[in-house]
Image (tube, rainbow, N blue to C red):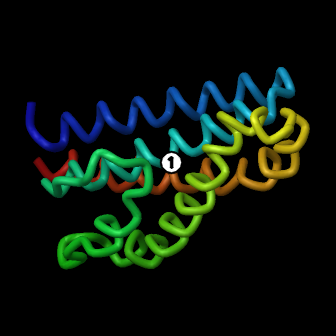
Amino acid sequence: MNNIEVAQEGLKRGKQWQQNGIRAFEDERWNDVVFSYEMAVEQSLKAVLILFGIEYPKIHNISNPYLKMNKTNIPKWFVNNMDFHAKILKILVKLRNKAAYGYIDGLTKDDFKEDAIEFQDSVTKIITDCETLIKDFSKKI
């Protein structure tokens, strides 16, 4: 598989996590929504790194290598959104651990309702941006 094919598979995985978030939203499992949102954004941004052949650390917050990418071959519209993408990822990574293990600190699923609602549109935008970029590059081959 080449980088575009692997990036497409990575994006597909990101969209699956988004779908998990949508289902959790419907079920009002707010903590699962937040967890799924983080994974959706993480996988989508990693797909972009893969597209450009960039190795990334096997951690959740890959915002540093993402922002340090050589932007020469990246369309300006995407570059203009990269700070936003990284900002949302950083926030979701912090929320993710609480969403997964918050019960230890007495948090309930309802403690994540506002976050689940707040980040819904941002996650969709990030995935759409990544999908558009990957599709555009796949057409060039």
* Residue at x 45% of width, y 78% of height: 80
Q: Position of residue 49 (x, y in %)?
A: 26, 55
Count of labels in the image: 1
Tag 1: amino acid: Val
Between 55 and 71, the one lying in front of the other is: 55
Q: Residue furthest right?
A: 110
From this view, report whether residue 111 is shown above or below residue 45: above
Q: Position of residue 97 (x, y in %)?
A: 61, 44
Q: Residue furthest front?
A: 104
* Residue at x 78% of width, y 33% of height: 103
Q: Dividing the image into 4 quarters, which one contains the N terminus?
A: top left
Between 35 and 17, the one lying in front of the other is: 35
Between 125 and 21, the one lying in front of the other is: 21
Between 84 and 94, the one lying in front of the other is: 94
Left or right, 41 with respect to 46, comes to right
Q: Please tell me how crowded label 1 is: few (under 14), some (14-19), or many (20+) other residues with Cα within 10 Å.
A: many
* Residue at x 82% of width, y 48% of height: 117
From this view, report whether residue 70 is shown above or below residue 51: below
Q: Position of residue 14 (x, y in %)?
A: 46, 36
From this view, report whether residue 79 is shown above or below residue 33: below
Q: Position of residue 136 (x, y in %)?
A: 29, 53
SS category of the residue bearing label 1: helix
Left or right, 110 with respect to 50, comes to right
* Residue at x 19% of width, y 72% of height: 73
Left or right, 13 with respect to 31, comes to left
Q: Quadrant of residue 98?
A: top right
Q: Quadrant of residue 31?
A: top right
Q: Check disc 1 and report the residue beneath it.
A: 41
